[in-house]
Structures are given as C-alpha cells and as structure tokens.
Image: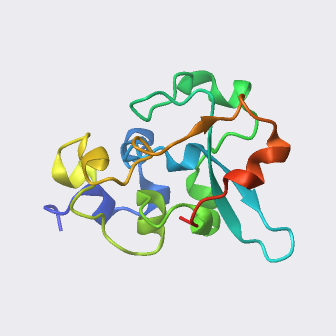
Amino acid sequence: MADRVFWQRKTLAEMSQSEWESLCDGCGKCCLQKLEDEDDGTVYYTSVICQYMTEDCRCSEYEKRHELVPNCVWLKPEDVDNFFWLPSTCAYRILSEGRDLPVWHPLVSGDPDIIHAVNISVKHMDLVKDNQIPESDWQEYVIDNQ
C-alpha cells in the first residue's frame, strides 16, 4: 500500500492543497467558455477561451482569477459529484469516476509538456479570447463536446 502514489491512496477530499493542485495537467480545457443547454443540461464547449490564458496553457492571473473572472472554474473536492461536465481527459473527473491517471498525465510521465505533445491540450487549437467577441456570439464557436 505504501508504494502506491497519493492519487491511488487518497480520495480527492483527503488530498492536501498541493496534491490537489498537482492533478491539473495543464490542458487548459476548463478555461474554454462553455454553454449549457437549459432544457437538458448538456454542456457544450466553445473555442472561446478566457482572456487570461497564455500560449503555454496557463493562467496569467491565477492568484487573482476569481476576482477578475467571477465565474472562473474553481474545482473543489466538495463539488466532486458535479465534475461530469469536465473533459473526459481531466484528472479530477478521471479520479472522481474511480479510474487511474493515464500514462500521459504529467504526474505519471514526469513530463509537464507531454499534454501538448499528445494533443490533449488547447495549445494547438484555433481559439479566440473571450474579451474579443460578445458573449451573445459564443454559440457560433461551439466545438465537439469534450
């Protein structure tokens, strides 16, 4: 049991803040703007991304993100039952569903850039910043459901 890594030994709720944060693979998909169908609850991803996303798929304002963007995604262990909308490749969703991290995840591979090499991140997508188009036009940017 001791040779198992923290994400195999602990539930999401048992993880320390640093363990929790390390689960993020840096794909940037949670920073894509999403639209929810009011009738059936389906969440649609768009190719519209937060204005604070950098070219290396990081937030340029991470520490102040919730002040600057009040509806910014804030994943917390107590919200694990609501992680269904996260991309199927997201470690938080994967672990909440009882699966193990894939071989390409940076915690498994040891390579923080592998997420881009295996084309799971938004780095190579044709994106538009959310401050460049009105929210009323976001539906024109819907992409395949993640």
Judge left or right: residue 100 versus residue 133. Answer: left
Quadrant where the image shows the N terminus? bottom left
Above or below for 35 versus 49 = below
Taking the spot 19% from the left edge, 43% from the top edge, the residue there is 111
**In which quadrant of the rendered view does residue 44 lie?**
bottom right
Residue 11, x across and y down, in percent: 42, 63
Residue 107, x across and y down, in percent: 25, 50
**In which quadrant of the rendered view does residue 132 lie?**
top right
Judge left or right: residue 60 versus residue 21. Answer: right
Residue 141, x across and y down, in percent: 67, 51
The structure's colour scheme is rainbow
Taking the spot 41% from the left edge, 40% from the top edge, the residue there is 123
Above or below for 122 versus 36 = above
Q: Residue furthest left?
A: 3
Taking the spot 76% from the left edge, 62% from the top edge, the residue there is 36
Residue 101, x across and y down, in percent: 30, 64
Judge left or right: residue 70 versus residue 85. Answer: right
Taking the spot 16% from the left edge, 62% from the top edge, the residue there is 2
Judge left or right: residue 120 versus residue 104. Answer: right
Above or below for 123 versus 139 = above
Nearer to me, 48 or 57: 48
Nearer to me, 142 or 28: 142
Nearer to me, 94 or 135: 135
Above or below for 134 versus 2 = above
